[in-house]
Amino acid sequence: MPEVIVVGAGIGGLATAIAFTRLGRPVRVLERTPELAAPGAGLSLWPNALRALDALGIGDRVRSRAVEHGSAGIRDSRGRWLSEFDLPALAQRYGLPIVVHRADLLDILRSALPAGAIRTGVTVTEARPDGLVRHTGGEIRADLIVGADGINSVVRRAVADTVHPVYSGYTAWRVVVAPSGPVTEFGESWGRGLRFGFAPLTDGRIYAFACANKPEGAPSAGLAEVRELFGDWHDPIPALLAAADPAAVLHHDIYRLPGLKSFVAGRIALLGDAAHAMSPNLGQGACQALEDAVVLAAVVAESGVAGTAETGSDGLARYDRLRRPRTRMIAARSDRLGAVGQLSSRPVVAARDAVMRMTPPSAQFRALAPILDWRP
């Protein structure tokens, strides 16, 4: 039986491999890094992603290594409420999101695959719509090529070679902290061109992140810079920064991918950041990759890969029709939220904060419905 080749052993790629393995399809995952590792950062998984994980048969395992994230809402830099979430309504209608360490999630995903399914140290140099994959070890022909190789995807060149990542205008720092005292309320705080958020992990650890408007590629002083920007914000932010290890801080500029005209070409399907890399403001990047994996496998199971998008039959074209509009909608919402959160003009920020204080929690709940209502 011709195999499925998945390029990239991140969350989306591994989830795709699990989905096809459960269908009885032979799967090979090609990963360019010599060792499978994960950055020291947390990850929010919303109820839509948890349903996808349940469909893959690993939802309960992920929940066992995660913490429910009952974010209280958004405050200003002094700790005054801008927006409070209706947590009881969210929990009753959808369930609460969870926060898991990225390394723990990847460990669960990898362990759900057969031994030998992942080949590390293999760099893919070209993928063709006819099913040919060229890599540093030779060539492979596949029934289906899944491009799950991130925002700078090599596989995407065969689908949309003129589309490139765009800088969002702000940079981010992430760190996992073991605080000296308990932290009981979680959420985000917004300032002028600055944001800080924190969420619980297992064993009392806290995942913290910060965003600041900066030119693309500007150097960072790491934790020292974060402490300078946020050290006088409300509690427990100064204590979290005091407890952070400078060597553990991750720093990345935030990029997004413009909307593609298609996620598929011939026997190639893109998913996750390779298809729709989005800003992290809604916490939906990994969630949408998990949805992609479940939907792609379901479409292939129903239609077969032989009927491809190129021939005009349903095949992968149905995956494109199901996933592209939804992910574009969510990416656009995330971009708008990020733009509002990163406003820096003093009078504009004052107006933003006033509007947020007047917006009822029910409006936020309704805004989340199109995202969280998804089911496999």
Image (cartoon, helix red, strand yellow):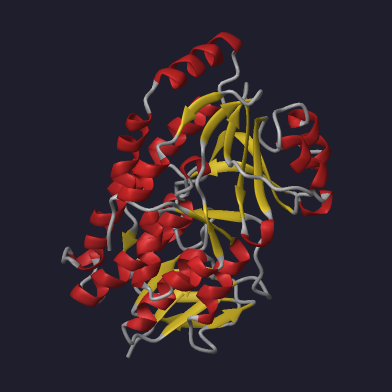
Q: Is residue 126 visible to the viewer in this orientation of the structure?
A: no
What percent of the width, then of the height, locates residue 51?
35, 63
In-image side of 90 versus 201 (left or right): left
Quadrant of image for the C terminus: bottom left
In-image side of 113 versus 212 (left or right): left
Count of labels in the image = 0
Between residues 117 and 39, which one lies in front from this camera angle? 39
Q: Is residue 14 visible to the viewer in this orientation of the structure?
A: yes
What percent of the width, then of the height, locates residue 205?
69, 55
Between residues 245 and 359, which one lies in front from this camera angle? 359
What percent of the width, then of the height, locates residue 255?
55, 42
Between residues 113 and 252, which one lies in front from this camera angle? 113
The residue that appears at 51% across and 61% down in the rendered structure is 154
> Residue lying furthest top in this view?
347
In this rendering, the answer to whether 12 lies above or below 364 is below
Residue 124 appears in which quarter of the rendering?
A: bottom right
Quadrant of image for the N terminus: bottom left
In this rendering, the answer to whether 361 lies above or below 311 is above
In-image side of 312 versus 250 (left or right): left
What percent of the width, then of the height, locates residue 130?
34, 73
The residue that appears at 38% across and 43% down in the rendered structure is 88
In this rendering, the answer to whether 354 lies above or below 312 is above
In this rendering, the answer to whether 209 lies above or below 153 is above
The residue that appears at 30% across and 36% down in the rendered structure is 366
Residue 78 appears in which quarter of the rendering?
A: top right
